[in-house]
Image (tube, helix red, strand yellow):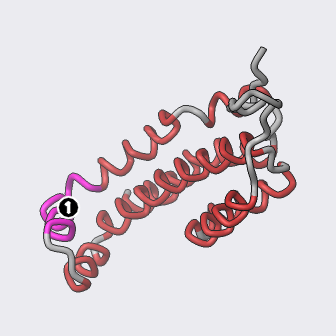
């Protein structure tokens, strides 16, 4: 069962990634990406896998060292729980990057590959995005410090 839950965890997050990558200009995408609730199904799987190995999980976070973490990862539920946690946090990170990219006016042609990289290797995707973000300024109207677009919505 843990193997199936491991596989399902990514598929629960995939629709949100697909929206941000393939439908970035669709109005509901920004509203969906602005919700932290997108991770709830993945976190539910996390709990299902983490509860049976809670003592080992608690040991790994209470007194972290490589051997304790390795022991946790040797358990199917331990590895599955850590994977679900990574999927959930990567999705939240991707949602932030998506919204921040919109705020800064970064083209979806640039953001799409960055989001794919973030799905696969989130630290690399985040580092590239932060570099790009540092080089950009939010689009604002003259005399107005508020960005022209927030979460994809142009203020009236």
Asked if one can make out residue 82 in the rendered structure from this viewpoint, the answer is yes
Q: Indicate the quadrant where residue 59 lies.
A: bottom left
Quarter holding the C terminus?
Answer: top right
Q: Which residue is mark 1?
A: 53
Residue occupying the point 76% across, 49% down: 21
Q: Nearer the viewer, residue 26 or 57?
A: 26
Give 74 or 117, whichever is nearer the viewer.
117
The percent position of residue 56, horizontal first and vertical second, equals 16, 67
Residue at the image point whose x is 21% and y is 64% from the top: 57
**Above/below status of 12 relative to 71:** above
Q: Residue furthest top?
A: 156
**Region in magenta:** 50-62
**x, y percentage for residue 60?**
20, 70
Q: Could you classify mark 1 by the number of other residues whose Cα lies within 10 Å: few (under 14), some (14-19), or many (20 or more)?
A: some
Secondary structure beneath label 1: helix
| Quadrant of image for the N terminus | bottom left
Residue appearing at x 31%, y 55% in the figure:
49
Q: Looking at this view, is 14 or 116 the one in front?
A: 116
Q: Is 43 on the left-hand or right-hand side of 67? A: right
* Residue farthest along the bottom direction in this orientation: 67
């Amino acid at each position: 069962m843990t193997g199936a839950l491991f596989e399902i965890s990514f598929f629960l997050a995939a629709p949100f990634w697909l929206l941000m990558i393939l439908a970035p200009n669709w109005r509901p995408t920004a509203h969906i990406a602005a919700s932290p609730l997108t991770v709830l199904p993945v976190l539910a799987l996390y709990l299902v896998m983490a509860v049976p190995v809670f003592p080992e999980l608690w040991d790994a976070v209470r007194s972290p060292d490589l051997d304790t973490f390795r022991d946790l990862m040797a358990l199917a539920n331990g590895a599955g729980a850590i994977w679900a946690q990574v999927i959930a946090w990567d999705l939240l990170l991707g949602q932030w990057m998506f919204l921040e990219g919109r705020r800064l006016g970064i083209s979806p042609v640039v953001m799409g590959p960055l989001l794919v990289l973030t799905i696969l290797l989130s630290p690399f995707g985040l580092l590239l995005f932060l570099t790009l973000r540092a080089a950009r300024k939010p689009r604002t109207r003259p005399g107005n410090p508020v960005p022209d677009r927030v979460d994809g919505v142009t203020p009236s």
